[in-house]
Image: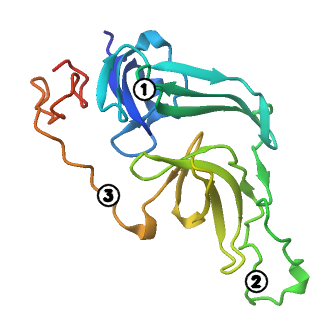
Amino acid sequence: MSADQRLKKLRGSGGFVMATIGDDLQQKGNLGGPDLFLAPIGRLPEALVSSYHCNACEKAYEGCPRIDHEEPNEPVSENLVLVERGQYVCTACESPIAEYRVFHKPNEGADAGLARPMGAPPQAPPESVPPGAPPPQGSAPPQAADVSSIAGMAVYDERAVMVGTARQVGVDSASGSLVLTVEAPDGSSSNVPWSRVGTVGEIVVLGAAGGSAPAPAPAQAPGACASCGFANKAASKFCEQCGKAL
């Protein structure tokens, strides 16, 4: 294995894969913090994936999960096209390990998706609002008209758990604050304050609600890895930290 190709854990909402990647893919998977995520990397060649862990099965498997994908070539905003979306799927229980989307800007030299937030009421002309006066109730905050459309992107919380799909950016009629409408897997929708939106790239990552610290990870059952010392679940066949067989 060359110096720039290393075995890395790439997390998804339903598990993780162990894959040999280079620095370029590692940078794509780094959303800030110690963990790497599979969603921004997209579809990996199956030969690079050595094993994966399914949270639904609570088991690890050798080889690559099934990768289902389609190429809709669907415009999602001005100068932004959804060219591919897909899922990494457990071959044993059919549960999704991770989801990804790939976007393309037809005009690389121009900004993508700049538009007034969908569903937001029109702003009053500047001359109709006295200088220094607060905006009318229900109007968009200053500069809210230039918010990138992120409709269709997967939304993850601060623990890298997928919570739903971004539907639109709008304005809360009661507070006048900008919100992101998220549709959960069960079809229900909720509004997330824009102040909680952390990273927006090929996916959306939320910060902790109310600025609180992220919830601690559940304690691991005994099953220390002989290679790195990580405490895995008793039934694990592969180390969740380094991927070595137990």
* Residue in the image at 25% along x and 30% along y: 240
Residue type at numbered disc 2 = Pro
Residue type at numbered disc 3 = Ala
* Residue in the image at 77% along x and 77% along y: 139
Q: Residues within 10 Å of mark 2 (few under 14, many from 20)?
A: some
Query: Measured along the vertical axis of the image, is residue 66 above or below residue 104?
Result: above
How are the colours assigned in the image? rainbow
Q: Secondary structure at mark 1?
A: loop
Residue 215 marker: 3
To which residue does mark 1 refer?
93
Q: Pointer 1 and pointer 3: residues touching (CB < 8 Å)?
A: no
Q: Looking at the image, is mark 1 or mark 3 earlier in the sequence?
A: 1
Q: Secondary structure at mark 2?
A: loop
Residue 74 position, x and y percent, is 78, 33
What is the distance, in whole Å, between disc 2 and disc 3 at their CAs?
37 Å
Q: Residues within 10 Å of mark 3 (few under 14, many from 20)?
A: few
Q: Quadrant of the N terminus?
A: top left
To which quarter of the image does residue 128 belong?
bottom right
Residue 135 marker: 2
- Taking 87 as reference, is 102 left or right? right
Viewer-nearest of discs 2 and 3: 3
To which quarter of the image does residue 81 belong?
top right
Residue 226 position, x and y percent, is 9, 24
* Residue in the image at 37% along x and 67% along y: 212
Q: Looking at the image, is mark 1 or mark 2 earlier in the sequence?
A: 1
Viewer-nearest of discs 1 and 3: 1
What is the distance, in whole Å, between disc 1 and disc 2 at their CAs?
52 Å
Q: Secondary structure at mark 3?
A: loop
Q: Looking at the image, is mark 2 or mark 3 earlier in the sequence?
A: 2
